[in-house]
Amino acid sequence: MIKLPRIYYLMVNGSATGGERHSYEHVDILNDCGFDAYALHLVGQRHPWCGAETRVIEGAAFWDNYDQTRDYIVLPETQVSLTTALPGKKVIFNKGLYSGFNSPEVRRDTICYPYTNKNVVAAFAVSDHNYQHLEYAFPDIKLFRMYAHIDCDLFAYRTLSSKKRQIALVVKSNDSLSVLYHILNARARAGKNNLADYKLIFLEGYTHSQVAEILGDSLMLISLNTHEGMPRIVLEAMASGCIIAGHGTGPLKECLLPEYQFEPDDSLAIARHVEDIAKAFQENVESVESWNHSTLAARKMAEAYTKDRQKRHLLEAWDQLLCGDR
């Protein structure tokens, strides 16, 4: 009897990042569809935030079961040095173009890139922006586009009139975020805007369900990171009915409405936008109702990130990769 190849997704981060959740979701989908997949923890244990149903394997058990002639290891883009350190077939799951090319293993004097290693059989890309750059850099690699799943039941849509005086901020691109925050805070302390009446919440250290609650209550989400792979938190905020302020670059172009996009480093335009929305919302909630057409359009974009689409693209990729093994 021919044994099916096992598929191991290497996990590296204990926090509930979008990238780690994406890998756990792949493991669940593959097992539901008859594959033999595991979340691999060479160091550490099952993430406390992941579902108990996800199949997890740790270091010692992995080495007892791993067959380097048959099995596959899926590496995140930040761990590409393991393409040579670990034996056997690899897939690179690139969830962040910039983090991948800025990882310690990829240097200016690099001669042989991990993507061209003979043990790397394919790569996964999480956005069109991500895909196009990898395809151009490594035209000979087998490359597959992956889609995240945005849980639009958990991140339920709420109209602007049901929102609180609350603004959520994504804690990335800290230099830009600091400039914007201190501009708004200085003006609030001087009585030049009404943001002293608003609660500003920095999205760090919260569980997935807590983030959903925060976004449900928040009038706006500010995300200034231009080095995204695919901005799940932005899509979740769009699902929740938040007005978004972000930079229209890279993969953000794929999901941000034009009225949500601002030029990078134009902190003044974003500050004025935030102040205008906050003032209108506080003085007369009906005056921001005109934004509901935007929040509804953004919700529809988030709804396109379905579990069915995620599953379809994932299974197509693995069916191709394992066509000689199943």
Image (cartoon, rainbow, N blue to C red):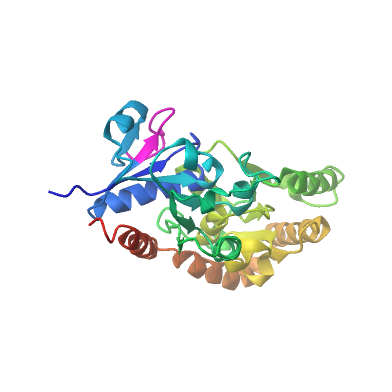
Q: Quadrant of residue 219?
A: bottom right
Residue 63 picture location, percent across and down: 33, 31
Q: What residue do we see at 54% from left, 72% from top?
A: 297
Q: Is 134 positioned to the left or the right of 38 in the image? A: right
Q: Quadrant of residue 279?
A: bottom right
Quarter of the image where the C terminus is located = bottom left
Residue 323 picture location, percent across and down: 28, 61
What secondary structure predominates along the stretch shown in magenta? loop
Between 101 and 153, the one nearer to me in the picture: 101
Q: Quadrant of residue 268?
A: bottom right
* 143 falls in the magenta region: no
Q: What residue do we see at 43% from left, 37% from top?
A: 86
Residue 235 picture location, percent across and down: 53, 59
Please indicate, yes or no, whether residue 207 appears anywhere in the rendered image. no
Between 145 and 165, the one nearer to me in the picture: 145
Q: What residue do we see at 53% from left, 38% from top?
A: 206
Q: Is 44 positioned to the left or the right of 258 in the image? A: left
Residue range highlighted in magenta: 39-51
